[in-house]
Amino acid sequence: MFNKSIREILDDLAKGEYSSREITKSLLERIKALDPDLNSFITLTEENALASAEAADKARSGGEIGSLCGVPIAHKDIFCTQGVRTSCGSKMLDNFISPYDAHLVQSMAKAGVVSLGKTNMDEFAMGSSNETSFYGPVKNPWDTERVPGGSSGGSAAAVAARLVPGATATDTGGSIRQPASLCGVTGLKPTYGRVSRYGMIAFASSLDQAGPIARTAEDCALLLEAMAGFDSNDSTCIDRDVPQYSASLDNDISGLRIGLPKQYFNGDTNSEVGKLVDQALTALEQAGAKLIEVDLPHVELAIPTYYVVAPAECSTNLSRFDGVRYGHRCENPADLEDLYSRSRGEGFGDEVKRRILVGTYVLSAGFYDAYYRQAQKIRRLIQQDFVSAFDQVDLIASPSALSTAFKMGEKSGDPVEMYQEDLYTIPANLAGLPAMSVPCGLMNNLPVGMQFVGRHFEEGLMLNTAHQYQKRTNWHELSPEKFGGQG
Amino acid sequence: MALTPDDVAKLAELARLSIDSNHVESTTQSVSSILHLVDQLKQVDTKDVSALAHPLDITQRLRADEVSELNQRDEFQKIAPEVENGLYLVPRVVE
Amino acid sequence: MEWETVIGLEIHVQLKTQSKIFSGAAVDFGQEPNTNACAVDLALPGTLPVLNKAVIEMAVQFGLALNAEIGYRSVFERKNYFYPDLPKGYQTTQLDEPIVGQAKVKIELEDGSEKTIRLHHAHLEEDAGKSLHEDFAGKSGIDLNRAGTALIEIVSEPDMRSAEEAVAFLKKIHSIVTYLGISDGEMSQGSMRCDANVSVRPLGQEEYGTRAEIKNINSFRFVERAIGVEVERQIDLITDGGTVVQETRLYDSDKNETRPMRSKEVANDYRYFPCPDLLPVELEESYVQSLKESLPELPDAKKKRFCSDYGLSSYDAGLLTQERPVADYFEEVATECKDAKLAANWINGELSAQLNKEDLEISNSPLVAKTLGQLITRVVDGTISGKQAKQLFETLWTEGGEVNQTIEAEGLKQVSDSGAIEELVNQVIAENPQQVENFRSAPEEKQKKMFGFFVGQVMKLSQGQANPAEVNKILKVKL
């Protein structure tokens, strides 16, 4: 039962092969048995899950139901869930029981999903390896000595280990796509503004976007249909109809123009990763796509640009965690300043502190123009690069990550080295473009992912292309041996 | 840009972050290395380029002036570290 | 040495909206603490701001009323600092691109002279909560009901040269926001607050002196006094060889002095940057135009109309139009009694004095406009004398009642019957033969002065009820 996709579960539930309660119970058992090795969950909400599974079963027998009625999923612990701890992977919010639901959590509940719990993540979504979580690192199910990527490492690992068929995640600089790539699952970061950010704990407001992680592009389409849409509580959320992505998956992609940035495919991408991506592109060519070289002249500035913009925004987004109204408060503060600096000093981990300090620096008087304004200008240049490229092509392809999953501890000593992990993913966040990662091979029995970047709001075309690719290959069907897969 | 431990202490004060004294050196180093990474932006000619604050070129939507939120004080204060008579308590604020 | 005072004002005006600037929580004062603080106001993790339409409308109306430049594109920024009444750790405000730009504001001084004060800009922002310091065993209690209330901050250029000018400017702004109905402008309630930047320099010197900022002054009178004592302090300081330091000071109205705020002045770095949770606000030309067309009559226009339509002096019209409720009151009285000048005299005189004495607003006057109008009508038609009218006014003020009934009940009717008055005149002439003799033999120019004596005697005899005009007439004949 655990090895089913969302599509299959929906069909089975419809046919009455089993109930939502049965699959929910079975997955909960599986999580309890296997997750101690992975640490992909922070909180398991067993009772709530069974109650909503029963409600889903009842609804299914009664008539009109949501599009995902009875499907078990997990939420990244960055989404506020009423009555359930919402930690964001931080000691700061270890005691935070959210008094409200995020918009995404509400809309998915409306679609009928059954949430099994909250998945582990890098603290405040800051990290590319899931090693910054207050709740300990998540392990990659393909090799538990290795990282799953981050920050949505818990969601990616849980899907890869078949603990859940799908999970929600967020992506500020690659936090959906890089762990999807490292765990051999499919992940999509929608266009900025496609999914409401209300109730999603902010890291960098102008970059954050929620999206799905699942096994297939088809499942991602089903999940995205449930999470996307207008929300009047988020000023940056766009009022625009949500297409039925799952209905266009079978469209013919012949004639599709896929752009290959010369900055990424410059011949030194001789690596194994490059070869696997090349093979994937060949498969797409065979499906009728055309490969065209494109130029993204400023894309190499994406990482430094990001490491000005994201820390700047996070440094002030995280000011609200002050020990006054909720969250961690230090013992016996001597005075107000002590309350602030000690609550925050104790509540935040090293990576979060580092970024707050960098953000504070780049916004401070005398440095603002040289760093922050300059970064915003370069962000414009990067976005314009994409606009020009999209005059020539419909999608842009690249590897999703530099390499396969690395060993725990291997990069955690040097933040700047760790930051290189997001080389391919960050540009889409800066430009607000939709992007996804699709499994495209194994290297030493570790997954490799291919990334697509699309035009604003063209998630449909991306999912269509990914689905066509997945119809022709079976990389997405592989799962780590230890977790009962066929890998 | 290489920072000194003093610079980092000032930033930490501004950001209200206590940093263990045995972490100051390593924090200074890592923050400096990040600033070194971003310093390359300074080389880029951005004359005549306008700053991009949002990835989408849209404007602010306005909300009707209506009261939509009801009193939920009890719910909200359940998770508060210290309250009395409906007030959040903090060490005395000096004016 | 002669000194010149330089003053710039920053005026915070709370906008009279139903809900807050960025959330759907109620704006409603005097409620239990934190009952009007919703998830957004408390800055719960994950919450986001959405801008209130009414706030934009009010700010644009304000700009239009001052004929200011309108910010067709305005941007909200974050001003970062930590304070327990500021839940997000930043205040959402405007800096480089405010909604209202420069303007020229005319003020009128008591001597009738006019002066123009330049407005630097006015911007929108959110108010903070309140810290309460009593009764918590050395701790402060935080109430966030006020957090997120919409404010418009009005920033002048340092164009004022005396406390009087500063008060006149403040009153002008008060008058405009209350005319527009965008604020109740209650300084005592904190819905209008004033910070004054004050410096002094030797007369003729071009550079400004170092300024001190006096925070949160909460009445017109205190603005005048606070500036007065601060100017004195600075001059004394400099004269004694000291220097003024740039700092924030508080005005203590009990001691009538300013003193530095106790908190250490940490050099703050607010790290302003555009708020990424909000987008630029863009206004359509047609929207601004429609607001312009629906502006109410503003003080300056009303004053002009009062002069031309009612024949009032510029001074009287100015007093009457400063506050809209006063102007409305006047128009009702004038319509009732059909004598605008008398109406103006009564309102600016007797009524205003009584209101001041009892510290009342005109809206709370025990005498409603209709009653005062009826009272004046009785003066105009000669039923009561001016003196009786004042007596009647006092009775109505303290005891209430209807005009005609009170005149009856108090026996205030003036005697105009010529037969009755003639009798009184005869009696006075009979009782004062010596004075009559003197009067008749005096030259004409002296007679004028002596005539008053007889009028006084007749009035006294009538217990003030005789119609003075009638008394004059009959006395002239008899003497």
Image: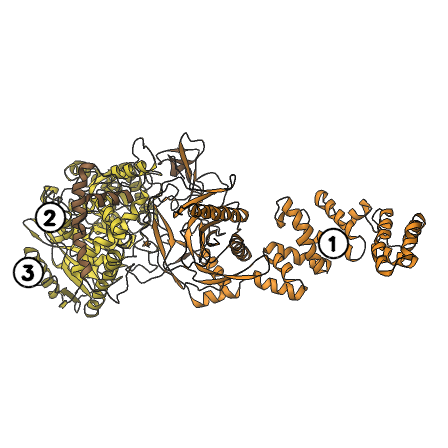
Residue labelled with disc 2: A405
**Chain C drawn colour:** orange
Residue C251 got which mark?
A: none
Residue labelled with disc 1: C374
- Amino acid type, residue under disc 1 in the picture: Gln
Residue at 83%, 55% in the rendered image = C449
Residue A214: image location, x then y, percent: 20, 50
Q: Tell which of A312 and A71 is nearer to you.
A: A312
Which comes sooner in the sequence, label 3 or label 2?
3
- Amino acid type, residue under disc 3 in the picture: Asp
Under tag 1, what secondary structure?
Answer: helix
Residue labelled with disc 3: A268
**Chain B drawn colour:** brown
Position of A394 with respect to A280 (left or right) is: right
Residue A391: image location, x then y, percent: 21, 70
Contact, mark 1 vs mark 3 (Cβ under 8 Å): no
* Mark 2 neighbour density, 10 Å: few (under 14) some (14–19) many (20 or more): many
